[in-house]
Structures are given as C-alpha cells and as structure tokens.
Image: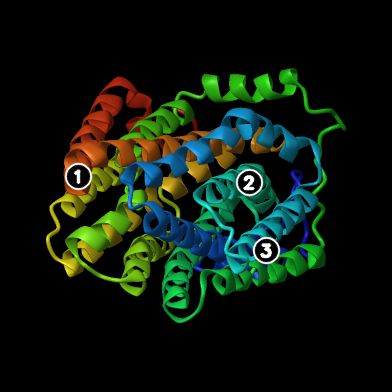
Amino acid sequence: MKEQDPEGRPRAPGSGAIRPWASLAYRDYRLMWGSSFGSATAMQMRQVVNLWLIFQLTGSPVQLGLTGLFQAIPVLFLGVFAGALADVFDRRKLLFLVQASGLLTAVGLAVLSYTDTLQVWHIFAFTSLSSASMIVGGPARVSLTSRLVPRTHLMNAITLNTALSEGAFFFGPIFAGFLLEWVSPGTTFLVNAFLFVPGMIALVAMRTSGAPESPRQGVSLRVVLEGAQFVWRERVLLPMFLMDFGVVIVGFYRPLLPILAADVFHVGPGALGVLFAAPAVGSVLGSSTLLLLGEVQRKGVLFLVSVLMYAASLALLGVSSWYWMALLAAGALGYTDSLSVVVRTTLTQTLAPDRLRGRAASYSNSFAILGNALGSMEAGFVAGAIGAGGTLLLGGAVAAGVVVAGGLKWRDVWRYRSEGSP
C-alpha cells in the first residue's frame, strides 16, 4: 500500500510532470472512476428518454421546460445539506445508497411503462427523485476523490472524472436513442436499471475509508452555515459560482434539443440521441486538452475564457440551419463547459480543508443543479414565445454579458494563480 500524507491521501511516487493518466495508478481511484461510469451513463440515458417521452406525449416546449422545476425542488430542500451529509457520514456508503436509488427509480419507470400507465406527472416525480440522488451523491463523490490521490494529482483526477462523465454523456444518449428505435421505453428503462449494478460492486470493493476525519458531529444548521461562511470568504470561488449560475440560467440548451430535432432538422430519436451526445465528444476533447497541459496556473483566466466561448457556442447552435452544424455547435458547448467545470471543481477541493470539502462541493453542486433547473424552465417558456433558435441566440448574448461584467467586477478571478490565494 502506498504511503499517505498527513491528510490521508496517497503520496506521489516522485517528482516531475504529471502524466495524463497518472491518477489511474491508484487502485481505489480506478474503482471510483469505474463506478461512476455506469451510473452516469444511466442518468444520461434516462434524461433523453424522459424528454423524448414528454415531447411525444404533449408536444409542448413548456412541458419540457417544467422538468427543470422538478429538478429544482430537491435542491431547495437538500442542496446545502448534501455537503454536510458528506462531511458527517461515510462517503462510500452515501454513494452506494445513491446508486441503489437510481436502480429503483429506473425499475419504477419500467413497471409504469410496461403496464401502459406512465403519465407525464410520473416522469416529473421520478425526475425529482433522480435530482435528489445527484445532489446527495455529488459532494460525496468529489470529496472522496480528493482522498484517493495525492494533492499534486487532484486536478488530474478531477479532469479524468470529467472525461469519464462526459464519456457517459456520449454513450448514454446514443444508447438511449437507438434503444428507443429498437425496443420499447419499458425495456430501455430496465436496461438503465442494470447499469447501476457494477458501480455498487466497485464501491464495496474499495479499501479507502469513506468515514470523515473530523470528530463525529450531526447535520445541523450550524454545520451548514460553516460551509456557507467558507464559500463567502473565498474571493475566487463565490464569483465563479455566481457567474456560472447566471450563464447556465440563460444558456441551458438540452431541453431545446428535441424541438430542434423535430421541427428544424426533422430527424428521429436515433439522431436526437447523437445530438444529445455531441457535447460529450467536445467535453472529452476538452478534458484531453487539460490532461495534456497538466497543471494550469492561471485557472481563473481559463475559467473566464471558457465561459465566454460557451456563450458564443450557444449563439452558434441558435443559428444552425443544418444538422451537422448543430452537432459542431453542441460539441463546442461541451468542450468549453468541461474546461470551466474542471477549474471550478479543482479550486473548490484545493481551497477547502478536508472537514469542509463536502460542504464546499455541495454549494458548487447546488449552484450548478439549480442553475440547470431554472435554465430548463427559462428555455421552455422562452422557446414557447420566440422559438428554440431565438432562445439560444438571446441566451448567448446575455451569457456573454454576464461573463464580461463578472470579470470586471471580480478581478481576483482572473488574477488567481495556483501558487496561492490572490
């Protein structure tokens, strides 16, 4: 077993440049990395099937947008407490429960589909359950990851996590789209359920403890507020969270893809699955770029540039008249998004001590999930008024304004260097 540093991480084997796959040298990180793939693929499959079913049942952009409301509801109740759970309870056990919840949710949808009783409100209810699982699992996963590799490998590990997740973003939608072409939605949901099993086995096989290092404490308002105070004091994290939140609210595009596929490109569920998967291709390329670059010192500059490029890619998707053009724009959205996610996640885990990592991650996660949920609602309602293309163009313009204004107001972000806080 490799030696550990004072914070319980494995020690790096030596000095020198960090290779792109360096974190995979650590056994438990490999298990953690692999355990995420099945569940992430299943979640992306289910999202595509749910949106496709809602549009087939209703034909309404507003109904597609309402999925965001039911994603947001659990954030309001669980968002800030999820990090406290990760700092108080065993993180491995929390992740196992999250995987089990995903399996049961998929089985429930399969049963409703097989019995021809599935309705839109069922999809909304299970969407809330899935959102709750993501909220609880996110801080536990990222805070456990920081314990599995040396500090010098943290950005590498988080980048590999992002690459794997985006691989799931690629395979999940394509798999879902073609399954819907070949088999019934019920069978698709059943396949979805089995994808959670390997991850549950991998979590059981891990040796690293998931128990918190700090003395045992309960989940209380004081514990939650301690994490809020940490985020509030950080002059880099909070501005990043707020800028990303603003951009996502006006720039969440995924609920609009079924509309573009049906009304603009006139393609079926298989091609829709490929369109959903295109951002994942870009994200893998973005993660590969970071893996090749190694340690990036000017992380704040990288964040601002990537989010500004995201806004431009959003506008490009809005003016796309051809399917291939939309695929390129969606790929660019995934590329730029992966860069900003890695930077934000790395800084959250770097700047937070171990006893606060779960809570810091929960605030990052809550901003992201709530932004996606509100963005889904905004996209659906605005598309109902001005169309999907107009919604994307407007979102790109507003997102660019948010980034420029944020960069001018919070100059500590673009001044940040990895050597320390500004």
Q: Which amino acid type corresponds to the residue marked 2 in the rendered image?
A: Leu
Helix, strand or loop at label 3? It is helix
From the image, which quarter does the C terminus lie in? top left
From the image, which quarter does the N terminus lie in? bottom right
Q: What residue does disc 3 label? A: 107
Tag 3 and tag 2, C-beta contact below 8 Å: no
Q: What residue does disc 1 label? A: 387
Helix, strand or loop at label 1? It is helix
Tag 3 and tag 1, C-beta contact below 8 Å: no
Front-most of residues 405 and 171: 171
Label 3 and label 1: CA atoms lie apart by 35 Å
What is the quadrant of residue 186 in the picture?
A: bottom right
Front-most of residues 139 and 17: 139
**Reading the chain from its start, which is encountered first: label 2 or label 1?**
2
Tag 2 and tag 1, C-beta contact below 8 Å: no
Task: Find residue 167 and report its horizontal and vertical position in percent.
Answer: 47, 67
The numbered mark at residue 129 is 2
Helix, strand or loop at label 2? It is helix
Q: Residue furthest bottom?
A: 182
**Reading the chain from its start, which is encountered first: label 3 or label 2?**
3
